[in-house]
Image (spheres, coloured by chain):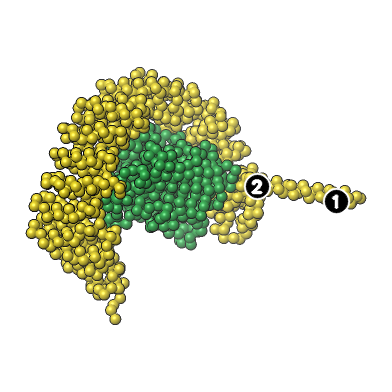
Chain colours: A yellow, B green
Amino acid sequence: MKNPRIFRMMACRFALLAILAGCALSARAAADGGNPERTQKLVVVLQSGAPLFDKARACQQLGEIGTREAVPALAALLADEHLGAYARSGLEGIPDPSAAAALRAALVTVKGSLLAGVINSLGVLRDSEAVGALRPLAEDPASGVAKEALLALGRIATAQSIPILRQALVAGPDAVRADAAAACLLAAEKQLADGHAGMAVTLNDAVRTARVPAVYRAAATRGAILARRTEGVAFLMGQLRAEDPVVRKAALLTIREKPGPDLAAALNAEVDKAGPELELQLLSALADCHNAQSFDLLEAKAAGEDPEVRRTALRVLAAIAGPSQAGVLLKVLTENRNPAESAVAGGSLERMEGAAVDDLALQALVSAREAGARVQLIRLLAARGATNAVAQLLKRAADPEEAVSVAALGALGTLAGAGEVPALIALTRACKGERARDAAEKAICSASAGAGNAEAAGGAVLAELEHTGEPAEKNAWVRILVSLGYAKALPAIEAAMKDSDAAVAANAIESLGRWPDPSPVEVLLTVVDTSPEPRLRQRALASVIQLAAVAADERQRPEAVVARWLERAVPAAHSVAERRQVISVLGRLKRVESLRLLLPWLDAPDLQTEAAMAVVQIAPALVNSEESAALKSALERIVATAKNPDIRARALKLAQSISKPR
Amino acid sequence: MLNSAGRPGRGNSSGESKEQMKKNENFKGLTRRDFLGRTLAAGSAVALPWFIPARALGRAGAVAPSERIVLGGIGLGPRGQYDLSVMIPEKDVQFVAICDVQRSRRERVKQMADDHYGNRDCVMYRDLFELLGRPDIDAVLIATGDHWHALAALLAAKAGKDVYCEKPCGLTIGEIQALADGIHRYGRVFQAGTQRRSIRNFQYAAHLAWTGKLGRLHTLHASVYVPQKSYAWLPAEPEPAPDECDWTRWLGPAPWRPYNSRYVAGGWRGHHDFEAGGNFLDWGAHTVDLCQWANQADHTMPTEYEATPVSVIARYANGVKLICDFLPTPFGNRAPQYRTSTGTCPVRYEGDEGWVETGDDAEVALSESLVKTRKRLFTGTGLSSAGHGRNFFDCVKSRALPVCNQDIMRRSHIASFAAQLSWQLGRKLTLDPVKEEFVGDEEANRMRSRAAREPWSFNI
């Protein structure tokens, strides 16, 4: 070069341009997800003698980060029996025209199912340049890939591919017509998505009227409705009147995909013109598409004479109702109607949002005359969590109608708080019937839940227990105190165990079985050991077992302590049921004491299986204990005699794990 | 949690593990009618009042007799057999055929059906097209490995069958989209096997969230397994005879790899080519779905996803957070993220006035500030799918939308996949919930789909 300075300038400019080009290249690669450096390494793998797995993984990774530089290496694998699909995965992922070009090129080099795969990939890529090559394959059933080609053309959905599909649909051989229909449906969806509703309508209409299986005609009916957009309403209504039930049903089902005020108005107008079958279906469809007038229509139909129409309208109304319809539904709930219809109305009211609905329901309760209606309303208020109803419910809890008072007390169990406990105690005292008392007890327990509340309520209920002489009342207070777990009441409850009234004593003993911790066990065991009354001994035993079970499960006491309780209880367990309950708890105590207690029962026919199961459960913890020999012997007995194969198998494995004593 | 007697709830003492699938439907005080009535508000349309027989819906050939739904099964392994065990007692369902590529499973399911009906009528198939080609079959139960779910469901829909499909319903976002579109296109009834929406304690928890009892909802917790992914191939073993196990059909749309018996015995889990999202969607398909539901977000998805070492944090456009907590021991102690006592698949919903947490053991944990009593509300468990199956069958008859229909499934699955991808890529992702594309991240977009192995295709 004659001028070194100019040379240096140009060299610098070239270098700068190269740098800028490199940056642009990197920027473009990053934007399309490509990583040139990794691509290069993966291409080397593909072109080497690497194992199949490495090449497969390379193909997959190229699909995720490959650049156009990988296309030739991937293309070379399209004919590979095992790697062809991997290669297509790579090519489908690379957003460069060369990937589709490689697939197009493979249309003439691969065969059989590999060719089908290549065609499928062209469809995935919606490669419009492949239309020309796909056409002969689509038009010739003997190509063996006509179906794939048609469906790919359907995915491509261009002005060039669509005529091929339409031709196959109307004039193609029977063998491909169904596939042509499916392809037309795919093309129609793409056209609609791209804003070409007119072509979507044309394609769907073509399938609707073609000689193809009903599933495609139904799909095309749906497609034709959706593609028509605003004109679809009139079209849809026309399809509802079609002779063909496939078309009618497809139209009905499409309503939910095309709701709008015009369609709602059209449906409202159609209901009264329709025959019985369609009337019911149209009413149902209003659930998906309705307007303000639809509610008036449904309310009228829900009050009609025809039971099927009434039920359908009510069900729809219940599903879509808002607070404005609460009054109508309350009327249905409280009138003396079919219980199923009341339930539908009640369910809707339960779900309805808004305090205004609570107020309406409460007003209805205040003015309700019939006991049945009051019960329904009370249950509704409870289900709605309407705490504004508590005062009214306290009044209704004293209703002379037992059903009403029981319902009210039940509702108070949900709605009442600590402030209502004194009133509930008074109600409990006043209760005549067992159902009402039971409901009142539960209400007190629920209202008292929470640490501070339980303490205050417990004190008030204990005072009642200490002052009443009435057996039924005593029993109620005992049950409540146990439910609250009010520790200060324990002496009084233990005293009740010795009450001269047998029912009071039995109730106290039974209730203590539900005490939240094992504190009462000793006093219950004393009853087991010493009570002259067999019934009381039995109840005490049941309570001891219950407390022992919980103590074992929740580690309220050491297992050794629980085992000692059961050891004392066992002699009193006479019936099979009682012994099975004991065994059940022994099976949770991984102690030699448990094993010793279980051993005799391995030979008892009625208890064998349960005892064997319990031994097998505790055995793993005892294999190295001082009783390992006895354990092994027991396990071997179980292997020999147990009916359950799973128990036998477990016992055998455990027995084999116990090494012989040296 | 205290039970109604004031005691904490506890498992049974017979040694049965909690993970075992139970059929206990002893929900205190609630009937199935209550479930259906109360879930009506969850988004499904009210029923059309009668059964539309097979012929009327375009399945050429026989009409199902009277009101009975004729059911076929595809790929019923342990989970599918459990599903069938709770479906087959339904009086208005007749199970007539099983398709499975493994002979032992075909025979076991046939035995189940024949024992139930007291005959030998259940037909076995190896080729699902033969089963789908039967005009008498109205619906199919699909419980294959994950990699077959979407395609089998699509083929069934195209054949005019309604579909109950186990979750996850597809292997990628692309498959989920194709499936949901296909169900719409062919007007089928579709129920995803995310059965917890049909279970009382989960319904109760969601209801608390919907009705403002928790105040303004701000955080949802969805438990998932610690994600993991394997690309490795197990050692090659000789392929069995096709009638014994048709490996080519077993693979289906998944790319080829050599046979190993562990795959077909359930060891496909965790493998990238066979399990959705590694194992992220095994629970995620349930728990993310439940959180979507509680947030009343079935029409949308979170827009942002960011992985941490212990979770993926997603955010909805309205600011509500969805945290997918990774649980290292899903069946053991789950503290501090969740209360172990609530059981597997726990979810937790937090608002500014309270929170609720529940799981498969049916315990419902509530904040003290929220309610008066923390008592165990249910005696049933959250595992039974019987009500979910019943919902499906009712919708097959009425053509209503099931509680986990294709649109609900679509969004909860895509949200789960988005969360998993943010973990896999180790970076924040932004999702356009309308276009269902990642914004400004083409690598993530590329991972939304994979090629199906020939001759299988989602172009249908």
Spatial distance from mark 2 to mark 1, Cα to Cα? Answer: 31 Å
Q: Residue at x 11, y 53 (%)?
A: A499
Image coordinates for residue A421, horizontal then vertical, percent: 24, 41
Image coordinates for residue B52, horizontal then vertical, percent: 34, 32
**Residue placed most toward the observer, A76 or B234:** B234
**Residue placed most toward the observer, B63 or A495:** A495
- Label 1 belongs to which residue? A8
Circle 1 SS class: helix
Q: Residue furthest right?
A: A2
Q: Quadrant of residue A627?
A: bottom left
Q: Quadrant of residue B201?
A: top left
* Circle 1 Cα neighbour tier, 10 Å, few/some/many (<14 / 14–19 / ≥20): few
Do labels 2 and 1 touch, CB within 8 Å?
A: no
Q: Residue furthest bottom?
A: A662
Q: Residue at x 67, y 46 (%)?
A: A27
Q: Is residue A130 left or right of residue B63?
A: right
Q: Residue at x 30, y 24 (%)?
A: A328
Residue at mark 2 shares a chain with residue at mark 1: yes
Image coordinates for residue A317, horizontal then vertical, percent: 34, 27
Q: Residue at x 58, y 49 (%)?
A: A64
Q: Earlier in the sequence, mark 2 or mark 1?
A: 1
Q: Relative to A351, does residue A540 appear above or below in the rendering?
A: below
